[in-house]
Amino acid sequence: MYTAYSVDDDYLILEEMKDIVPWQEHGFELVGSATDPLVAFEEIANIRPDVIFVDLKLPRIDGNSFIAKVREIGLNPEFVMVSAYDEFEGVRAFFKQNGFDYILKPIDSEVIGIVLRKIHTKLSANNPVKDDNSNEIEGDETTDNPIFNRLIMYVKDNYTSCITLDDLSKEFGYNRNYICNMFSKYLNTSFSKYLTKLRMEKAVELLDDNMLMKKEIANRLGYKDYFHFYKVFKEYFGYAPGKHNSN
């Protein structure tokens, strides 16, 4: 699945882009959006989306200058201009930068859908999406989103450390809200609950080894102190760690 980002100074336009465009039907995931072009630039530099929808009229910078700024840092996504203006110079400057398509507002989901299909065809020819076992994860948590599959694999490899949402954000370049939304969408849970599930399943395994002290188990599972581990364990199972072998 390819990734998309939307930049527009009108918050309502961004909401329409999220709500009315059937991204996944066309093989895309909307991974971020922003009304502030400076915020958008920073996120795009980390996320590196495959396609960017950008407004022509932005605060402090116009859409064409924004495109040039993104290209200056070595990124080369497809660009789609979404604008209320069809002035000749703006359109001409956009296509001189090899822009993919120019769409006039108001937002039309069918028009964007057509553009997405064309972009998907182009991207597939140049950079096919991998859909093999390298994206699969253990258990029943494999999804049709390779981005989330890789993220889950990372969590499974690092859940015994003090991993946080900020760590995931830095590692994968996605904002916290997007990561939270993926956990909710694909696993019907939150990141913190999923992390606790992994740790508690491992806790039971370690508690069955009578050679380990409970404080050591807490440390192995990423808890800085035993009392935190004790509280989480009791809330999760309904009994204290010391009572495990008697249950």
Image (cartoon, rainbow, N blue to C red):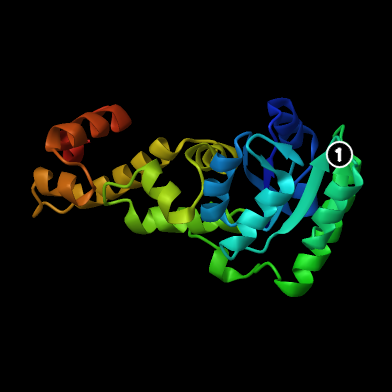
User: Where does residue 69 sit, x and y in percent of width and height?
Assistant: 62, 55
Q: In which quarter of the image is the C terminus?
A: top left
Dot 1 amino acid type: Ser
Q: Is 178 drawn above or below residue 133 in the view shown?
A: above
User: Where does residue 192 sit, x and y in percent of width and height?
Assistant: 39, 37
Can the viewer see residue 140 in this picture?
no
Front residue (pair 19, 239):
19
User: Where does residue 178 sit, x and y in percent of width and height?
Assistant: 55, 41
Can the viewer see residue 69 in this picture?
yes
For label 1, the residue is 109
Front residue (pair 101, 187):
101
**Image position of 120 (left or right of 139):** right
Q: SS class of the residue under badge 1?
A: helix
Q: Is 79 drawn above or below residue 110 in the view shown?
A: below
Front residue (pair 100, 1):
100
* Residue at (21% x, 29% y) in the render: 231
Q: In which quarter of the image is the N terminus?
A: bottom right
* Residue at (56% x, 42% y) in the render: 38
